[in-house]
Amino acid sequence: MVIGSGFGGLAAAIRLGARGYRVTVVEKLDAPGGRAYVHHQDGFTFDAGPTIITAPFLLEELWQLCGRQLADDIDLRALEPFYRIRFNDGEHFDYSGDHEAMRAEIARLAPDDLDGYERFMRLSEQTYRIGFEQLGDVCFSSFTDMLKVAPDLLRLQSFRSVYGMVAKYVKDERLRMVLSFHPLLVGGNPFTTTSVYCLISFLEQSGGVHFAMGGTGELAKGMVKLIEGQGNSIRYNSEVTTITVDGRTATGVELANGETLAADVVVSNADSAWTYRHLVPASARRRWTDKRLDKARYSMSLFVWYFGTRRQYPDVFHHTIMLGPRYRELITDIFTRKVLADDFSLYLHRPTATDPSLAPPGCDTFYVLSPVPHLDSGVDWSTQAEQYRQRIAQHLSDTLLPDLNNQIVTSRLTTPDDFHQRLLSVKGAAFGLEPILTQSAWFRPHNRSEDINRLYIVGAGTHPGAGLPGVLSSARVLDSVVPDVHALS
């Protein structure tokens, strides 16, 4: 039984199906994807969540387990450049997978940092080789597993933050922002996230940044097709309210309608904190008690505005990072002070730059994402959301999307309340637990539950963490910890 059809849950179902398990995926929503749900509105297609696809070999592996090729179902397009990063003064940096193009951009922006950039990328590769290739699909079931890798982590200076590591190599503040923003894509604060996440720079450079034609939702649909091809199934509109246990062993799930479904193995792709706080009986928990969950640190949340325009904006790239007037101070407001600041940094997604079919002819599909504090901020989004949207709309109109307010033909919002109520995420945190060193690897909720036998965790809230490569790797871990199907009989 797999709870949730996010990418982690779908990948888990495929991997277990390939090992001979009969698998049922139970999903609260009416369609697959979880955070990668798809909204269809007024002829526009909006990917709700992840839009940056890296490490495509992890997807290819899933298709191969089913005797197919990824290209049979998915048309992945490499993007070049990866992002346009726009500074608040209007200057920009085109972040590319082309090494010489990157050197040219750095020479234009901060020529004195060329050597430092090269040394940083060598560090990023070393970190990738250890942090991703060697440890990304390791199950940290015991503290001795952590002790074994401690020398490598010390050598990589994992005690530093991503920003701190970047600052060690380059001096220009704008280039420091360019090379350190990646943790925000996985729910982390660049000033506190362990520098192990510097591996993302090499991960992107080595494998590219891609987009699935038709939208990221096509990946979820393709994975569902693989699951059904294995003879397994997905039940929608089926919210799990309890993981049933006998003593300290998972025996299945109970749904909101009162139905009980038995299973030999339960895999939760729900938010890990939600799984322990709301699905596992308190009497069966020893490590992940309410007290421990209360003391944990959670990622920021997101404000996302999806909108379609009656005209096109051909000068806007597929991915644009719009940095605000403050960097460290804004991030402190979000993660530490937990206040909704007057300024913002934004990620603007224009998928119709690559796939015009996602909008009616002559139109553009967009979403703009703003990192915001999670629900401990006390912000009343029922009253603040529209005001915040208007401020963002005005900023976009003043910068990249002239006359925007007169061009909008459809619009919808996602706030931290939606992450909490619709996606069942504790505190409305968009990425689960914050990826600081003391909440990574062994310190994170384990892929094999410490509290409940035959309960396993996949997704952003377990090892190795958030982001498409992370959640797909969390399902990879199951290969080493879920027993062979014949061992259960």
Image: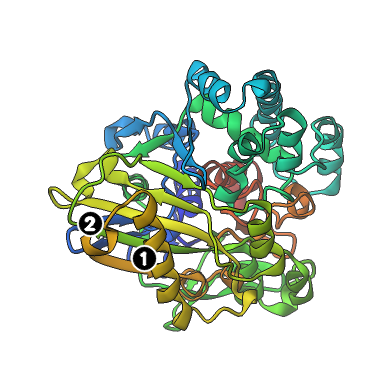
Q: Quadrant of the C terminus?
A: bottom right
Is the residue under label 2 in contact with that under label 1 (CB below 8 Å)? no
Q: Is residue 213 visible?
A: no
Q: Residue at x 62, y 46 (%)?
A: 183
* Disc 2: which residue: 309
Q: Residue at x 23, y 49 (%)?
A: 358
For label 2, the SS is strand
| Residue 330 at x, y percent in the picture | 63, 58
Is 361 or 43 nearer to us in this picture?
A: 361
| 13 up-or-down from 276: above or below | above
The amino acid type of the residue labelled 1 equals Arg
Q: Nearer the viewer, residue 45 or 134?
A: 45
Q: Residue at x 51, y 45 (%)?
A: 89
Q: Residue 333 occupies which quadrant of the picture?
A: bottom right
Which mark is drawn over residue 235?
Answer: 1
Tell me: 119 left or right of 456.
Answer: right
Q: Measuring 39% from the left and 50% from the top, which residue is drawn there?
A: 399
The amino acid beneath tag 2 is Thr
Q: What x and y, as percent, mark residue 272?
A: 62, 63
Q: Secondary structure at mark 1?
A: strand
Q: Residue 266 appears at what percent x and percent y?
A: 56, 61
Q: Is residue 346 toward the left or the right of residue 159 in the image? A: left
Which of discs 1 and 2 lies nearer the camera? The answer is 2
Instruction: Please say whether residue 426 is visible from this viewpoint.
Output: yes
* Crowdedness near tag 2: few (<14), some (14–19) or many (≥20) residues, C-alpha within 10 Å: many
